[in-house]
Amino acid sequence: MSRQAALATMLALGAALWLMFGDAPRAGGVARWAAASLFVAGFGWYVYIRIALWLHRNR
């Protein structure tokens, strides 16, 4: 995983966690769902990249 991809993933996950447990619960349901979606997308992207790298190394 490139450093840029890792940084983007960590920023997305961090922003999602901050939204989920920071200001979003007070902001309402839409912000909470947006944060949860961002977290799932970021985590899914991270898992996808890790699996792709693992498969590439073990060819």
Image (cartoon, rainbow, N blue to C red):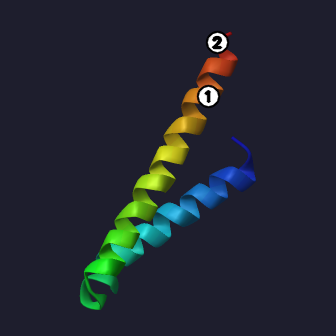
Can residue 30 be seen in this snapshot? yes
Q: Amino acid at mark 2?
A: Asn
Q: Is residue 21 left or right of residue 53?
A: left
Considering every residue shown, the one lying at the far front of the view is 30
Name the residue: 26% across, 86% down. 28
Q: Nearer the viewer, residue 30 or 11?
A: 30
**In the image, 39: left or right of 3?**
left
Rendered image: mark on residue 33: none
The answer to which quarter of the image holds residue 7 is bottom right
Which percent across, then down, holds residue 53?
A: 64, 28
Identified at 53% across, 64% down, the residue is: 12
Farthest bottom residue? 26
The answer to which quarter of the image holds residue 24 is: bottom left
Local SS, label 1: helix
Q: Nearer the viewer, residue 56 or 37?
A: 37
Kindly identify the amino acid type of the residue bearing the numbered disc 1.
Ala
Residue 37 picture quarter: bottom left
> What residue is pinned by disc 2?
58
State the residue at coordinates (43%, 68%).
16
